[in-house]
Image (cartoon, coloured by chain):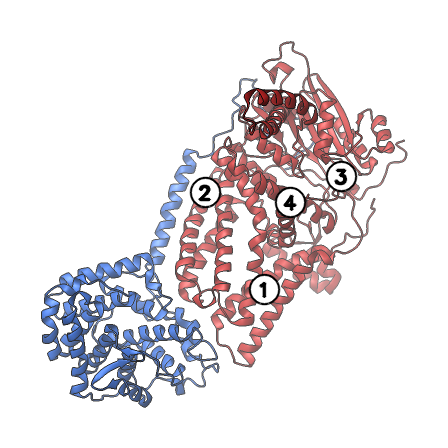
Chain colours: A blue, B red
Amino acid sequence: MTIDPHDDGGPGIGQHDGQGRGEAIGQGRGWLTARGQIAFLVGLVIAFSAIFALERVDFSRTADPLGVGWMDRRSGVPFERLRSQVAPEVRQRMIGTATRMLADRMLAERTGAQPTLATGAALLGYAACVHMADPCAERLAPTMDSGHVFSGGPDLALDRFMGLLGATSLMQHDRRSQAALAYWRDAAHALAVTGAVLLPNAPGHAQFGARTSQLVGLAAPVARNYTSLAPYFENADGFTRAGLENSRTTAEGLALIATAYRDDGASRRLSWYAAIGLGGRWEDLPTGLLALWWRLFNEPGVEEALSARLVSGTWVGPGGPVRNVDLAMILLAFASLDAGPLVPTLP
Amino acid sequence: MSGARREWYFDKFEHRRPPPPSPHNKTREFAWQVLGTIAIVIGFWYIQWRWSNSLNLDALWFAVPLVMAETLAFVGLILSVINLWQIGDTPLPEPPATANDIDPHERDGRPIRVDVFIATYSEDPELVRLSIQAAKALRYSYPIDLRVHVLDDGRRPDMQGVTEHEGADYITRQTNVGYKAGNLRNAIEMTDGDLIVICDADTRLFPTFLNRTMGYFRDPKVAWVQTPQWFFDTPEGERLDHRWRRFLGRPGGWIARGVQTLVGEIRVNKDPYDNDPRYFYDVIQRRRNPANASFCCGAASIHRREAVLHSALRAYADAIERQVRSMTDPIDDPESRDALDEAMRRELAFDQEVTPFKFHVSEDIYTSIILHGDPDNRWRSVYHPEIQSKMLSPQDLKAWAIQRFKYCAGTLDIGLNDSPIYRHRLSLLQRLMYGATIWSYLGALWSWIFLVSPAVYLFTGIPPVSSFSLEFFVHFLPFILAFEIASLVGTWGVANPKGKAIYTGFFPIGLRALWTVLRGQPVKFHVTPKERQSGRYLSLVRWHIAIVALNAGAIAVATVQIFFLATRTDLAGYIVNLFWATYCIMLMVIWIRAALWHPPAEARV
């Protein structure tokens, strides 16, 4: 259809109908008509349904549905150096009783001396002792039962998730931890809701936080698959691209996942890549991370570095006394060695 | 004076008839509204995910600009959905018979007086002759006092001769103050029509123009009626099968026919500059009508003199008041203050000019904003969807660029220096609609980021997102699909894919315009040439060529690194950015082809 510009014929769109001058002029139907409002509401319902469905896609449950092929290709030579980069199998090893006792004694001393400073790390340490059925559990029990551990408050994002992990483990062991679980669940929830899981620029911690949040049904909105860590590994210079601090927190979170949870092969492989990616520069690493790696890998260099942290009958870190967080990781490593993963059932 | 009839390049297009307005399909409109809502909601979800969970924290220098660009473009999408929400044509009453039908204060039942203004500066007088003849051929259902005026800012004797030969009035002035707006102002002072029709030098009104537009003025609040502009001379291009037969012989023709059987007719080089303004008028302007926010675009519009003058007088009084206040307010002594006040008012009343059309490079939209925001009168605008005139399009990239630079700089100047967002008398919807226009021109600030981002990734391997993982696709694909499907349905029948390329590649002109405005420099431009200029304009597309080279080079480098040197392994990121870079190249090639395009040999001016 075309309009003949010379035709002044019958009514068309927007054309008068010759019915006289009483016709309404106005501005048509107005902007937001009833039909438009219905369309808007229908659109809202469909959109939110779609978002809800998409948010239900749980990447972690299927252990990284995209695959972790990028890990295997990180050498830059696809399919060739894959075998040489496979993490060594964990072999059983022994740990001296004195060494083990040292960690639990330090934790007990700190928790007992400053009960209000008890943190999620202390709770995780206690859970590890319970898991090992070790005397340290008895040593820590009075402090834990006093309730201080629940009121001290976490100081790090990582600490909150350690607390949540410890409380969950204790609950699984039927150890009076419902109140603890509620507290740490709330603390973790607050982080997950505000997105602070991502902080402080620590993708490995974020992974650990996300994985741990799922223990209590909290879907952390970040780091739900390992591919988000790809930039930290896919580079020619190894595992240092983001700087040592970032590399450390990435490695720490991965090692925690691999140690605490059963059969998380992807995080164990990534931990291995992180370890070898640092190229033996282990002297500056936290003692807790070394302990976790010692648990996970049969790597002589790690064992040497960890042994060097035992000075005059005490555990030390690279710059002084170890933190509670490191002590908890040391105990977690020992517990895992003795009794398997702290939380045997993955969410 | 008339002599032998001139031959024009557009003679062969005279048979063309304008397309009708797109039909108003309520079912499709409902579907569009649903889809538009979905696109916005999912867009919010995507953008919040981008900011909170997807940034590559190791490369914030790259991640933040890209996510900023996405966010700003998303704001444009929201404004676009609001703009295109629905069609709401204003019912057209019967044409008014006498002056008192459009002016309640008029009592004597005299015929309505209509002035047709044809503004010209340097255009060929013979071209203007056609416009005069068309104006003289206007018909109306009732007796009418119609006068045609040629407003010649070029002060040319031959123009005067043509005008007088055609029986029209010739109006000129001694200066060019205010350019087109000043030219119109001068004519308004010398005429007295109830209604004023504004035409450019090449605007040829259809005989039905008055009958189709004047009925709206029965509403005394209607200030102007804008009709769509129609460029009847846009190149129609060449059928794909004809073209391929020329280059590839018969087999090429057969293949092209097969392709066209599947996807419909394809025309190569059709409207290379995307001059066809149908999307702007039939979609954007038409759907602003229900919000009383369609704005005047100059040519092919008709105005109520009272509205134009009322606002002009108000602006005149406000300007005097402002100047007087600035001088008298600091004076403490009431007697001295009053004396100075009185003296200054008298003096300024002579100095200050009444400017019915705002003296501005974009006088049409500026005047629209002033009328819509008039604190004393809620003036209405009407967009009439039927094409009622025809005109000529810019015939080369330079002319096109001049025209778009003018639009862009003018609109940005209004947005930055007298933003309608802050005009209190504009309704929220009017602010949003005018804001959408300004926002679209600000797109030059971020569109280039989309064009260079894939090259940055392919060259460096640094991703702007934390990873190109399933999580990325689960967020990105629903958003982009929702947006594209909504656009498809919302602009059904008027879709303009080439417009997207033109808009994306507009950034060199847009940034230059923005820079001009930010520096407070006057927006200088030549009158848009109506005849095709000779030459190719590769300098106008040097940035587009650079982007093509950048992306092509990046694709080559990344391909070699991944498949031959095996120094990179980011296959997922490579694939995503390969498509992205290729798409950018395709968009830029449209610009480059436009610069190189020249019409087939034909009779020209």
Count neighbours of disc 4 (C-alpha within 10 A) and say few if under 14, some if 14 to 19, many if 20 or more: few
| N-terminal-most mark, 1 or 4 | 4
Q: Residue, x 38% and y 72% (percent of image)?
A: A246
- Which callout, 1 or 3, points to the residue nearer the camera? 1
Could you confirm whether marks 2 and 4 are on the same chain? yes
Q: Is A153 placed above or below B412 here?
A: below
Judge left or right: residue B395 versus residue B287.
right
Q: Is residue B205 visible?
A: no
- Which callout, 2 or 1, points to the residue nearer the camera? 1
Q: Is B567 placed above or below B524 here?
A: below
Q: Quadrant of residue B231?
A: top right
The foreground one among B144 and B260 is: B144
Give the residue pinned by disc 4. B520
Q: Chain of mark 3?
A: B
Q: Chain of mark 2?
A: B
Could you confirm whether marks 2 and 3 are on the same chain? yes
Q: Is A222 placed above or below B286 here?
A: below
Give the residue type at disc 1. Answer: Thr
Q: Which mark is residue B14?
A: 3
Q: Secondary structure at mark 1?
A: helix
Q: Quadrant of the C terminus of chain A?
A: bottom left
Give the residue type at disc 2. Answer: Gln
- Which callout, 2 or 4, points to the residue nearer the camera? 4
| N-terminal-most mark, 4 or 3 | 3
Residue B134: percent from left, percent from top: 76, 30
- Which callout, 4 or 3, points to the residue nearer the camera? 4
Q: Secondary structure at mark 4?
A: loop
| N-terminal-most mark, 2 or 1 | 2
Answer yes or no: do the residues labelled 1 and 3 have beta carbons within 8 Å?
A: no
Give the residue pinned by disc 1. B582
Give the residue pinned by disc 2. B33
| N-terminal-most mark, 2 or 3 | 3
